[in-house]
Image: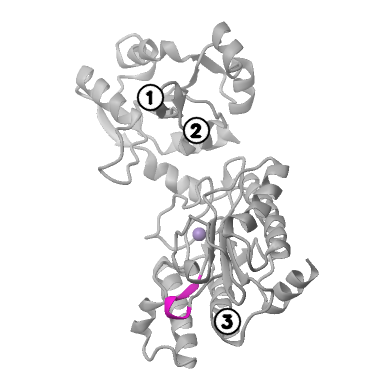
Amino acid sequence: MYKKRRQKLISSLAEQSIALFYSGKAPKKSADQSYPYEVNRNFYYLTGINQSDSYLMIVKGINKQKTILFLEPYDRLKALWVGKVLDFEDAKLTSGIDDVMANTTISSVISQYLGTARAAHFGPIETLYLDLERRSMAEATLESQNIANKLTKLYPHLVVKNTHPLLSVMRSIKDETEIKLIQEAIEITNEGIIALLKNTKPGLKEYQIEAHYNFVLNMKGVTPSFKTIAGSGINGTVLHYEENNRVVEDGELILFDLGVQNEFYCSDITRTFPVNGKFSQRQKEIYEVVLNCNKKVIEFLKPGVTNQEFNDYAKKLLAEGLIKLGKIETEAELSNYYYHSIGHFLGLDVHDVGDYTLPFEAGQILTVEPGLYLADEKIGIRIEDNILITETGSINLSANIVKEISELEALMEKK
Ligand SMILES: [Mn+2]
């Protein structure tokens, strides 16, 4: 599987090039403590290896290719203190890469390929591919930038290119293994949501209800795919509310936006329900507008639909609903009550890579998450599902997670 992915990448690289990927390293926290390590997702996608300070090097010569994985070598003392690093033989099996070397040798190996030593077989290397993804100028310097700076100083003829766009396009189309892992993440999310429905009651703190979700995940040995949002009452109208420390009151709704990370593949689900188990008439009215939008947008998704159409259609449905209820008069007023986009790509990242300027394609997984946030009425509702685009339309991967009013109320009554 990883070999296949690397072959696909290699086919889009220029000849006489080297591509380097770095797995990342845990940032220092304080003294001898570090923040948790998160593997670079492009590195993981191409190797299946989850270990810090590892490199993948791909050399695409004129008629010859070479792929090498560089890993931290065995260290007796470190093994005694923090445990063993990945065995080179195990890494070969996982990644399908036959050449595994110590990461301490990487500089000398790169210099062999950039120098005359290997030019006879691979041709002189002209292009250096690095994963240079950066979300903002404020982000810390990337290891790939350090490599670019160092190598272009020593080999000024090298042309540097960014591999991230290539990986984004590849990663946005999911294969069967990836779909299965996301489906599993969704099933566990479902179990967690059922635990929430059965344990929600007025008087509890938001985090005390959330604890029931975390318990399900802990028992399965998985982690949330992002910090859970548990917003009751007016907190449900704050899109990224994460404090989760308010007492939930009788007559309010509570909104849970949460997910599961399963071998790095994420689910991202939102459900909203009444704290006391029964929707009020008003809550029902607003909920039905969001639910109708959620269902119709899911049906609307198919290959060829653009992100613009996806968003416009959702807005139209939400506005129609609120106009019917007399809450607003024109579609333009919707922005007072709905202020995010309808969905995003989902995969190795919760907000996954993918090109939103291109029409959707089969194999992509998107969230559909309409919401209405009526702060003046202390009502915040979002209903989010995870949708796989297929050749003929779409499949709701989270169809098993309850969202009908009657089903939610029935489950809450069972306790
Ligand atoms: Mn989402």
Looking at the rendered image, the disc whose residue lies closer to the viewer, 1 or 2, is 2
Give whichever of 204, 244 is nearer the camera.
Answer: 204
Vertical placement of 138 versus 56: above or below?
below
- Identify the residue under disc 2: 36
Q: Position of residue 381 (x, y in %)?
A: 53, 72
Q: Which mark is residue 62?
A: 1
Q: Quadrant of residue 195?
A: bottom right
Whether tag 2 and tag 3 are in contact, CB under 8 A, the answer is no
Q: Badge 2: few (under 14), some or many (20 or more) residues near its Cα, within 10 Å?
A: few
Label 3 sits on a secondary structure element that is helix
- Identify the residue under disc 3: 283
Q: Earlier in the sequence, mark 3 or mark 1?
A: 1
Whether tag 1 and tag 2 are in contact, CB under 8 A, the answer is no
- In the image, the segment drawn in magenta is 370-377
Q: Position of residue 6 (x, y in %)?
A: 50, 33
Residue drawn at (38%, 28%), measured in percent from left and top? 19
Quadrant where the C terminus sits is: bottom right
Q: Is residue 218 left or right of residue 155?
A: right
Vertical placement of 239 versus 97: above or below?
below
Q: Amino acid at mark 2?
A: Pro
Q: Amino acid at mark 3?
A: Gln
Label 1 sits on a secondary structure element that is loop
